[in-house]
Image (cartoon, rainbow, N blue to C red):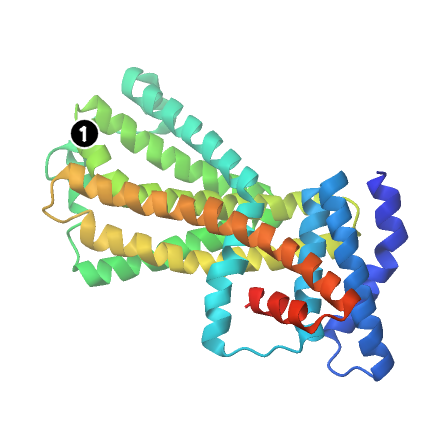
Amino acid sequence: MDLDAYSLTHRRAWERLDYLSRKSKLTGAEADELVMLYRRTSQQLARLQSHSPDPELIAGLSALLARARGRVLGTRTGAWQEVGRFFSHRFPAALYRSWPWWVGVASVFLLVSTCLAFWVDRFDSARRVLGIPNDTGDLTAPGGAFETYYSEHPQGAFAAQVWTNNAWVAAIALFTGVLMLPAVYLLFMNALNLGVTAGLMADAGRLDSFFGFILPHGTLELTAVFVAGGAGLKLGWTLIDPGRLSRVEAVARQGRATATVALGLVAVLLVCGFIEGFVTPSPLPAPVRIAIGFSAEAGFLLYVFGVGRRAVLGQARTDVELSVALATDNPATVSQATFSTR
């Protein structure tokens, strides 16, 4: 299948469907046209998925059909239902669709941090190049600045401060990603700080303390930063390579997905702030604190690759089922498809 030719052939119909699904009031003829275009686009999406899957094109059509579905079914949901649907469908689906980007960011970030840590630990030249003082005992000694940072403020206030700071860093990484270089610079500086601290603690023979304080909250916290950086860079790359859409359409579509990720990460970073404020400085043994951090990370990854994958596949399946129901005028099938969208 020639995707370029296929997209060009059907683009006007997709744009018309988008227009009708956003229009506040429809005439009878427009309502009939909306149903017809929805059914046809659902069938086209199913054909694309089975013959020549293109993640960007499929994601765009899925988002288009999700908007149109509400107009076709005439559904109205309450505020709490919308919040529930956001965290059960929209947010995990956006995370799952962008996972190659943030996994790539994570790989490069951790590689850079590891190399920097090794350099600082093993070579004196690293201190000269990076401007690190020769005496860093105030930072690395037992009870030094590295450890007291997590306990020098009241836990609740510290958790709130951490949440606010991390949300700010994630927002910068997300929305400067459209310019690419600022997001790359921010990620590099975070990798530099992590690598230098790890190298200094290793040089002092206190790497166990470093991991004991970093891993409980840092595992999930860094993953949130990776997600923000990956989603931001994907937005920037969309500006460079919009694919089969116009540059404005592609950036607008990816911008909506980026905004979804930004909103969802607020909740993820709230969990990180709670762990950093109450678990990291707690008197619990280090293995227990680390196990709590790993459990939070495992829960997030299960959320992405379990709930997110199911949301993406379920959305496409529902569109096809509803298309068949509308084509056959089967009320029972329409009702079943309606229920599965909620």
Of the pair 178 and 71, the residue shown nearer to us:
71
Instruction: Give coordinates of residue 296: x percent, y percent.
Output: 31, 47
Horizontal side of residue 325 vs 205, given as left or right: right
Instruction: Give coordinates of residue 58: x percent, y percent.
Output: 70, 49
Which residue is found at the position 11% from the left and 40% from the top?
285
Horizontal side of residue 179 vs 38, given as left or right: left
Instruction: Give coordinates of residue 328: x percent, y percent.
Output: 78, 66
- Quarter placement of the C terminus: bottom right
Which residue is found at the position 35% from the left and 36% from the top?
193
Q: Residue type at mark 1?
A: Asp
Horizontal side of residue 290 vs 253, given as left or right: left
Horizontal side of residue 105 vs 116, given as left or right: right
Q: What residue is shown with label 1?
A: 208
User: Where 196 sits versus 292, above or below?
Assistant: above
Residue 118 visible here: yes
Which residue is found at the position 78% from the left and 58% from the top?
41
| Residue 314 position by quadrant | bottom right
User: Where 30 sits versus 36, above or below?
Assistant: below
Q: How many marks?
A: 1
Residue 252 visible here: no
Mark 1: few/some/many CA within 10 Å (<14, 14-19, 20+): few
Disc 1 element:
helix
- Quarter placement of the N terminus: top right
| Residue 139 position by quadrant | top left
Instruction: Give coordinates of residue 71: x percent, y percent.
Output: 70, 74
| Residue 212 position by quadrant | top left
Of the pair 72 and 206, the residue shown nearer to us:
72
